[in-house]
Amino acid sequence: MKLADYFTPDDYFPSVLRIKPEFFAENNIKCLICDIDNTLATYDEEVPIKEVKDWLDTVEASGVRIALISNNREKRVYMFNSVLGYLYVSNAGKPFTHRLKKLIKQTKAEPSETALLGDQIFTDVLCAKKAGVRAVMVRSIDTTKRPFLRLKKYFERYFMDRYEKKKNIY
């Protein structure tokens, strides 16, 4: 794999709500590990909004196991997951893969049948690629309150341009 491939998502969607359960079946994804902040919720949302919870329920009902992973602290992840009840990892240290690989083992999934869903190239996509799982990326929900995130998004543009030349955008 070329170095740039580690920073290029396998798939990109404008929102998690645009990902149909059929996508997972078509790509042999049996386990979906989701980032929380700016992927499933804003930093201000303590629990998932109804539409996101309904989407997670629909994906799970289609036979996909779901788990959560976040670089955020335990209290935030525990609160968000309190209405969901999934396996989860907080303080994950993405893009390092140790905690992700441990979570994959807990789900009893094979890496080849697992996808990591996130909103950032330098944490989520890189972590997925290093762990040998599919990297599914969505547009960040809100970057206005996080100046550092806006800066990272500026540098991510190169890799998103590369992705757009190589892949289909859903």
Image (tube, grey):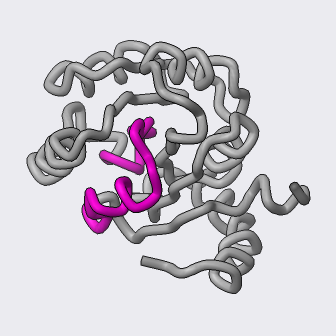
**Residue found at x 29% / y 68%:** 18
Give the tally of numbered discs: 0
**Residue found at x 47% / y 29%:** 69
Q: Is residue 58 magenta?
A: no
Of 22 and 56, the residue lying toward us: 22
Q: In this view, which residue lies farthest toward the right?
A: 2
Q: Point out residue 39 in the picture as x, y percentages from the top left corner.
A: 40, 50
Quick check: 109 above or below 52?
above
Instruction: Tell me which corner region of the image, top left, top right, bottom left or bottom right, holds residue 22.
Output: bottom left
Quick check: 153 above or below 105?
below
Of 148 and 78, the residue lying toward us: 78
Of 21 and 37, the residue lying toward us: 21
| In this rendering, position of residue 39 left or right of residue 91 | left
Quarter that holds the C terminus:
bottom left
Quick check: 32 above or below 141?
above
| In this rendering, position of residue 16 left or right of residue 97 | left
Residue segment shown in magenta: 17-41
Quarter that holds the N terminus:
bottom right
Quick check: 38 above or below 80?
below
| In this rendering, position of residue 49 left or right of residue 29 | left
Q: Point out residue 103 in the picture as x, y percentages from the top left corner.
A: 51, 19
Q: Point out residue 125 in the picture as x, y percentages from the top left corner.
A: 64, 50
Q: Is residue 37 magenta?
A: yes
**Residue found at x 22% / y 39%:** 60
Q: Point out residue 66 in the picture as x, y percentages from the top left corner.
A: 33, 33
Of 155 and 16, the residue lying toward us: 16
**Residue found at x 40% / y 71%:** 14
